[in-house]
Image: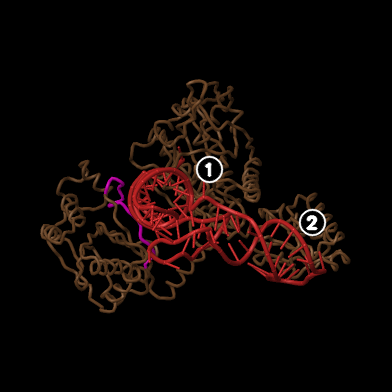
Chain colours: A brown, B red
Amino acid sequence: MSDNDQLYAMRHSLAHIMATAIQHLYPDAKFGVGPVVENGFYYDVDLGETKLSEDDFEKLEAEMHKVVDENWPFERLEKPIDEAITWSQEHGQSYKEELLNDLKRAGTTVAKDLDAAELGTIAEGEAAVENVSFYKDGDFTDLCRGPHVESTGKVGAFKLQRVSGAYWRGNEKNAQMQRVYGVAFATQEELDQHLHMLEEARARDHRKLGQELDLFVFSDMVGSGLPLFTPRGTVLREELATFSNSLRTRHGFEKVFIPHMTKKDLYEASGHWAKFGDELFLVKSQETSDELVLKPMNCPHHTRIYASKPRSYRDLPVRYLETTTVYRDEKTGELGGLNRVRSITQDDSHVFCRQDQIENEIHNLLEAANELYSVVGMELRVRLSYRDDGDAYLGSPELWLSAQEQLKNAVVANNLKYFEETGEAAFYGPKIDFMATDALGREHQVATVQLDFVQPERFGLEYTGEDGHAAQPVMIHCALLGSIERFLAVYIEHTAGKFPVWLAPEQIRLITVNQEEKTVEFAGKIAEQAKELGLRLVVDNSNESVGKKIRAAELMKVPYTVVIGEKEMRMERMIPRVRKDIEVIPAHPEMNFEEFLKTVANEARGRVTKSSL
RNA sequence: GCCGCCUUAGCUCAGUUGGUUAGAGCGUCAGUUUUGUAAACUGAAUGUCGUCGGUUCGAAUCCGACAGGCGGCUCCA
């Protein structure tokens, strides 16, 4: 057995051990499923009126340790399916009974396959299971395919994490059960390491840092999912958007501007209305009977600019670029921090081009994405998101196949790491989705490049071809940051708020040793010079001790702090205090003020992460 | 939207089984101090205890609704 298989068996066995403990403490518990998940395991239980909370974990863990110490062997038992069903009935395990009935009928418990069985893809009874296996540890027996470790004593280190609601079989129409999560590793050391990582993640939580670093706020009066950005947070947004845009304007993208609402006619034409109508915010006019829609995406508007005049094959590609906000009426329970908001700002762009231009256009966009993520220091991986066999997609299957192939070719040609997944496409076309890995090894979906043959058709977009006949352009959607809000959530946690100089809301802080006029004047002069160089510099000449002012600058994670006193004024030179994640070459530089400011300005201009001081 | 938990000063949090004028630290403001690389000293102000309704002689404390937040589920153009 490989280490991976061994760990899997440990976690799976722990799910059983937890269920064993739950059964000891709550004899009426009904069990759902208890699988292995990333870093651990969970078990879904129905305890009727009893609600578990994290306060119960201590005694639950104690009971689990008891089961572990007793070192019961995991015994495998085979039962004919009907006997198993009878067993479930006798033990009041109605969820298990449901699973067994599915096994008997369709040979599977996977909901997706069950649909197929109902549709007749799997003939009734054909794949039916005759025997099922159970595993028994001590006084607990559970329907289970295995594998398990030999005995309850061999499960490594574990800790219960949390309890939450979960629908039986993931369907919101079903009963809601309580899901108890635990993490588990082969050794205590690995478990501690993982717990430490979780602690670090908590410390870096963008919601916490957003408040501490004064980047964004929410207001009850404005509403949930509607973040307000402070001056500091706005610097981040604008610097990021400017960078993202610059990577495309150099490839011929032109900025456009559209209003944030529209008649719903636009979305009826695009197909969004039928598909996403309930997620749109509606805006009523008080004067006329007009009802407008807040835009949930930008492409339909952009097609209207394209379609505003006749286009020649010579005009293509036409490339529009716009950083703009869309609005989606996300369900309240899905909102959280900047990860999921109702006002979503996209660094969006749309290319309208000929078939023979697709490859080059996609190439430019992939290159831009690569550059952006190398500058922000995150590793990229690509998901090719294809359609599945469902009917949720517009456009002919042949078109889809060809589009999917072209995307793959472009990804391969760009040497990107990729994997393919069906069912992840947009309704109008396949996508290249970029996944970025952050400093804690977590992966987040960020940029996206999408090919679209459907909207040009629905909007009747045209250009006059070389042969004089009307032809249909292809659209390529692209957002490099994705949603600026979500990107910020990811990026704040990636950097723990220690932004590189080009992004830092405050790049330099000057701290005066005293409030004497000549000191304040000197600081003002430096601030003036910094302003001319386009630097963001703040002077702190408050009536506090130098130590306290240093501390304040440290807490705000300012890259460079300079103390100004007698010595600096006399010599016109100083040694900047450098935030400790920044590598300084050479170490302990002493330089004059002008030299220092110019160096920092260059660093910002070059968007370098490591200092060049 | 669903399940569970939570909401006390700008921030982080105390607040005994329901019982007078609701507290602390940080921050803010005022004064003293003129400060040398992660917290000087003294003093002051600050709250519809999320909102509305109910129970009670009496509610920050108990109950309900709503709003907002957190952890999941479901969803994510």
**Is residue A163 in the magenta section?**
yes
Query: Which type of secondary structure does the marked residue at label 2 adopt?
Result: helix
In-image side of A516 versus A294 (left or right): right
Q: Report crowding for label 2: few under 14, some 14 to 19, many 20 or more residues within 10 A (C-alpha).
A: some
In magenta, the rendered stretch is A160-174
In front: mark 1 or mark 2?
Answer: 1
Q: Which residue is drawn at 40% across and 49% down?
A: A421
Q: The disc labelled 2 sits on which kind of residue?
A: Lys
Residue most toward the right? A570
Alpha carbons under labels 1 and 2: distance apart: 44 Å
Please identify the quadrant where the C terminus of chain A is shown: bottom right
Q: Which of A451 and A340 is in front in this view?
A: A340
Q: Nearer the viewer, residue A303 or A227?
A: A227
Q: Where is residue A551 in the image (x, y as percent from the top left)?
A: 68, 66
- Disc 2 sits on a residue from what chain? A
**Residue A363 has which mark?**
none
Q: Report crowding for label 1: few under 14, some 14 to 19, many 20 or more residues within 10 A (C-alpha).
A: few
Q: A109 above or below A72?
A: above
Q: A463 above or below A212?
A: above
In-image side of A124 versus A257 (left or right): left
Q: Position of residue B25 (x, y in %)?
A: 61, 67
Q: Where is residue B68 in the image (x, y as percent from the top left)?
A: 47, 48
Query: Which type of secondary structure does the marked residue at label 1 adopt?
Result: loop
Q: A487 above or below A454?
A: below
In-image side of A337 versus A372 (left or right): left
**Residue A221 has which mark?**
1
Q: Do the residues labelled 1 and 2 touch (CB within 8 Å)?
A: no
Q: Nearer the viewer, residue A56 or A318?
A: A56
The answer to whether any part of residue A339 appears in the image is yes
**Residue A598 has which mark?**
2
